[in-house]
Image (cartoon, rainbow, N blue to C red):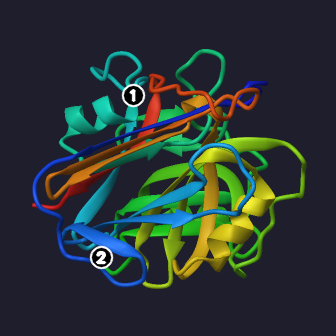
Amino acid sequence: MRGMPALALAALLALAGAAPPAAPAGFQALEPGLELGQFDGPPGVAGDGKIVVVRIDPARFELRLLNASAPSHGGLLTARAWAERAGASAAINASMYQEDFRTSVSLMRTREHVNQRRVSRDRTVLAFDPLERGLPAVRMIDRDCEDLDGALRGYGAAVQSIRMVSCQRKNVWAPSARRTSAAAVGVDGKGRVLFIHARSAWPVHELVNALLALPLDLRQAMYVEGGPEAQLFVRGGGRELERVGAFEAAPAADNRDAWPVPNVIAAVRRR
């Protein structure tokens, strides 16, 4: 949520059953098309210092935008609860929201429901649910590289937020001393979707540099939440992982409570 002065963290990991086979480049396969990676972030930070990445193959999973403002969706839920309700394997924040605890600060819509029709100054839009054959299942639109209206015409769902990595693979987050836990969404060179969570509070510019240095083949990324609201949930292959953000004033606090949020992006296995 934009404007929150304090930012926080927590994580919960539940393991069950035998470990699934390892995937290449630091990832472990949870299910076909769903992989989990846990990487060391920059040193000298409070907390676990880990960057967690869920890698999703859009040929096997479809993205869905879930909104509390949509008819029959009810109130706010944690990422875990949103995923369980939708039968999803993973869920992450879908950008920041306003003080009504419903409406996104920037463009957010599906075919059936418009949460926010206003296009803000933010430079990146995640587009999914293609309306035409032959279009990528998921793509990230950089407004400095292409026309937004034209690019969005072929997609039913759109989520706008703050650009972290440009279409030229550049870190475009302005350097700042402010630290925050963060949730982000990215795409790699094969068109796979990356749900990213850092519970430790790094300066975001430093976090982006770390992401570009990891074996992710990260091509573009956008920030979707910071602080205690920032969360990620994934389940598959007998494992569950829930990550929760931290308050900036107490980054090492043992906060295990996920905050209910109004909007998430979920990954649901294709039938």
The x and y percentages for residue 255 are 52, 25
Examine the image and state in which quarter residue 171 appears. bottom right
In percent of the image, x 55 and y 67: which residue is there?
A: 140
In the structure shown, which secondary structural element does the residue marked by tag 1 occupy? loop
Q: Which mark is residue 133?
A: 2
Q: Are marks 1 and 2 in contact (CB under 8 Å)?
A: no
Q: Picture quarter containing residue 227?
A: top right
Q: Quadrant of the C terminus?
A: bottom left
Residue for point 40% across, 24% down: 68
The local secondary structure at tag 2 comes to loop
Whether 186 is drawn above or below 98: the answer is below
Front-most of residues 29 and 62: 29
Q: Pointer 1: what residue? A: 78
Res 259 seen here: yes
Say if 75 sits above or below 222 in the image.
above
Q: For the residue marked with disc 1, what is the amino acid?
A: Thr
Q: Is residue 60 above or below residue 161?
A: below
Q: Position of residue 150 (x, y in %)?
A: 59, 68
Q: Nearer the viewer, residue 9 or 109?
A: 9
As shown in the figure, which amino acid type bears the numbered disc 2? Arg
- Horizontal side of residue 165 vs 133, given as left or right: right
Q: Is residue 165 visible?
A: no
Q: How crowded is mark 1: few (under 14 residues within 10 Å), some or many (20 or more)?
A: many
**Residue pictured at 21% horizontal, 69% vertical:** 60
- Horizontal side of residue 115 vs 138, given as left or right: right
Looking at marks 1 and 2 on the same chain, the residue that comes earlier in the sequence is marked by 1
- Nearest to viewer (mark 1 / mark 2): 1
84 sits left or right of 82 in the view? left
| Residue 123 pos. (x, y %) | 73, 58
- Left or right, 122 with respect to 24, comes to right
Q: Label 1 vs label 2: CA separation?
A: 34 Å
